[in-house]
Amino acid sequence: MNKNRLGNSDLYVSAMGLGCMSLGTDEATAIPIIHEALELGVNFLDTADLYDSGRNEEIIGQALRQRRADVILATKVGNRRVPGQEGWTWDPSKAYIKSAVKESLHRLQTDYIDLYQLHGGTLEDPIHETIEAFEELKQEGLIRYYGISSIRPNVIREYVSRSNIVSVMSQYSILDRRPEEEVLPLLERQGISLIARGPLASGILTEHGASKANREYLGYDSEELVGLHEHLLKQSGGYRTLTETALNYPLANPAVAAIIPGASSLEQLRLNAAAATAAPLSPAELAAVQAASKCNRYVQHR
């Protein structure tokens, strides 16, 4: 598995990481998936304190008890659960971030987090205070680097210009090309990496994904999704699987350090890992994919 430098940090992450949100809450299923990912060369795990009310972090901590040094571990903060209430509230305050990190460290059974990410963000946030919290956590040795998880260019611009983020996590796939318009060029100029989540578009961009195309998706109606799915399958000409094309599409952009598809089974993990280590897409393949898909500009989040 190739490794790429994450922004200007000294973290080198596997080109395919593991998005842990889909692992589920059963240790007997989830822990073998994590261990197998490490054996396949995956060294980058991404989670969040929000996932399964912290249970996701607990499972990862259990799985890594003897292998913490082998992993670049990322988690997120900002969505605060209120005891006794349904759902969560958004809280990017310094006080909450510095409190929440201790809970994540405990659940993850570690004394440091490699990449701590703000799990969202708006222009109404106390951005200076949020950045100050992350910088203090770095100084205290509780985190090594920080980033932001966002699809909003206006928020991303603020953190790029005002902070020392090394990464932006954002949805990016053949079906969601919004980052290409502004975010990816900006990050490349500034030496900041994109971590691409959702590269398989909830399974639509896999061999059997036509069965999941019975809905609208970012400006595509169901008929368009089925047609694009068929087109991409034919375009591979038997030389690639659709999963290979989908996972390698984000990685073709120089600003992308890693993709983080999820996996809920060992079989799914192995298929993703094999696809992600296939030969890079050629310029002709890239051009054909872009010609067939939309730029999604009209659904851009500002």
Image: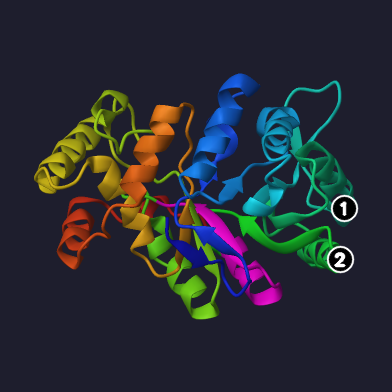
Q: Is residue 218 visible?
A: no
Task: Write the start and end of the magenta stretch as one range.
Answer: 154-172
Q: Which residue is more in the foreground, 278 or 180?
A: 278
Q: Which residue is more in the foreground, 184 or 282?
A: 282
Q: Is residue 234 visible?
A: yes
Q: Which residue is more in the foreground, 50 or 145?
A: 145
| Residue at mark 1 | 98
Q: Secondary structure at mark 1?
A: helix
Percent position (x, y) of residue 264?
Answer: 49, 27
| Residue at mark 2 | 136
Check the image and report above or below for 208 versus 239. Answer: above
Percent position (x, y) of residue 207?
Answer: 24, 33
Check the image and report above or below for 271 versus 77. Answer: above
Q: Residue at x 83, y 51 (%)?
A: 111
Circles 2, 1 touching at the beta carbon (< 8 Å)? yes
- Mark 2 burial class by Cα count in 10 Å: few <14, some 14-19, many 20+: some
Query: In the image, is residue 24 part of the stretch drawn in magenta?
Result: no
Q: Quadrant of residue 229?
A: top left
Q: Counting residues from the N terminus, which is met first, the one under dot 2 or under dot 1?
A: 1
| Colour setting | rainbow
Percent position (x, y) of residue 174?
Answer: 31, 50
- Mark 1 burial class by Cα count in 10 Å: few <14, some 14-19, many 20+: some
Q: Is residue 274 left or right of residue 187?
A: left
Q: Residue at x 74, y 54 (%)?
A: 113
